[in-house]
Amino acid sequence: MPSSPVRVLPTKGPITPRDVTAVILAGGRSQRMGVDKTQMELGGQTLLLHVVEALYPLAGQTIIVTNRPEELPLDKLPDDIVVTTDEVAYQGPLGGLVTACSHVENEWILSSAADMPWINADIVNYLCAQCAEHDVVIPVGPQGPEPLLALYRVEAIEPAGRKVLTSGRRRIVAMFDELDVKEIARSELEAIDPGLATFFNINTQADFSQAQSRMRKSSHDEVVDAHAELSDVHEECTSPKKVRVMSLLEAGRKMPSETPITIYLNGVEIATVQATATDIGDMALGFLLAEGLVSDRSLFDGLDLDAKRGLVYVRSHEEVPLDLIHGTRYVTSGCGKGVTFSSLGHARGIEPIDSDMTVDAADLHEWMSQLATRSVEYRQRGGCHSCGMVIDGELVLVREDIGRHNAVDKLLGHAWLEGIDTSRSVLLSSGRVSYEMIVKAAKSRVPFVASRSAATDLAAEIADELKITLAGYVRGGKAIVYTHPQRLIDTTR
């Protein structure tokens, strides 16, 4: 069976919003408003839901801290949002932050008040990019420093916050004397959010009236952009909502590309794969390599592409095994209707990988960050997965596709074509790792597979048998190692 998960201790370095736990502070008394302002409706939905819709698509985890959990609209919240109550009620935002520290999965917290309806995703991204070697990253808004929309390193602020609360103080800034605080100048923020609407919060009836006026007058495009990827989360909500219908031109986004690609080997049609029509020659070779239809690079005789019709013709002096061509096809859990001819029994017939290579946890996080930076298709279109290959400590290859397995095929196919030795490489994936991806890695003798997302139980079982190190959730200063953890080391201990 796979080894027990091993958590790698946090390391300092730049982060992305997916490495962050968003903590929405909704535990205040709303004394100046006179009513629970988090449940007041603005533009057809409550203030709290505005904040949830802004932060949930961005963060790796979302927590709501409240003293009135029974009043939350649980039927309208995503199932994986954590709802908790203050350890000690009504100790202010600092009390909520300290409470959240006991529930976070990530190294960093992005705090937010529950009454900030126009949080800009680009502001959040910018704050995350400033995190290296600091304990707090705090923007300076129109009213000065904004501790209610700031980033906090958990291991630093939990003890400092508890110390301040014990002294009887409740202000977040009271703990800053003991922390490394980086302020983000107002001018930097205005370059991203010219009106600084992100920092508008609603404390009084006058504020609420101003927000209503703004909502009526503003097209608030930035809000639509930030929330687009969450649109399907609330499809089952029973209460009516105002929905802005946009054309693709108005949204200003490109669509991910999906094309049927048919692969031929020596004139025999092997398979048709739904894929993104880039690097399709590499993909065809990776697919054939993983299926065992090609293996000897010296017998490869070339390939021809008909990109317009989505056809790839591979020539090899290796014969096409008829039993594999006409064997059972298995629909995998990969995106894009991936197919594989190989059964699980075939996978378990692969020779296990004996490798003494080791990977430093800090390096693994850095490579995963580089993978995100170099994922151009995802940034422009969304809806794509990316895979990377690390050799000798460098991210040397990156491939993208609508299907996770296709991206792996593109990566490994290119390595095989170019004669790259992958026996001491690390395969990175942005998406879930399923068993056929482990089989593909094993066919190329890759000893280490890591993802910023999850791995399936069957993937872990196969990886354990084939002696492949499998790590998941490589983000937020941690990694969960499912199999063969001896290859992942933490030099900061």
Image: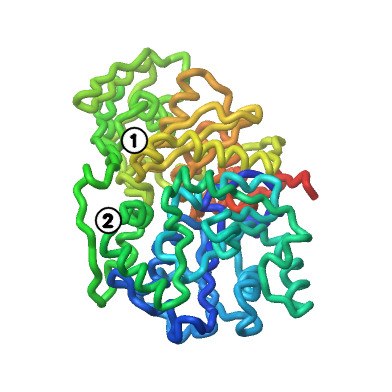
Please state which of residues 156 and 323 is positioned toward the viewer in this rendering. 156
Viewed as shown, does residue 278 lie left or right of 86? left
Is 425 positioned to the left or the right of 263 in the image? right
For disc 2, the marked residue is 219
1 or 2: mark nearer the eye: 2
Q: Is residue 422 above or below residue 330?
A: above
Along the line of sight, which residue is nearer the eye, 96 or 454?
Answer: 96
Residue type at the position of mark 1:
Leu
In the rendered image, residue 140, in percent from the top left (x then y), is placed at 58, 54
Residue 327 found in image quarter = top left
In the rendered image, is residue 434 in sight?
no
**Whether residue 149 is situated above or below residue 439 in the rendered picture:** below
Mark closer to the chain start, 1 or 2: 2
Residue drawn at the location 45% of the way across and 24% of the way down: 414
**Can you identify the residue that label 1 sits on?**
324
- SS at mark 2 in the image: loop
Residue 3 image position (x, y, % from top left): 65, 56
Q: Is residue 9 left or right of residue 265?
A: right
Query: Above or below — where is 67 with respect to 105?
Result: below
155, above or below 410, in the image: below
- Residue 134 appears at what percent x and percent y? 69, 50
Colour basis:
rainbow
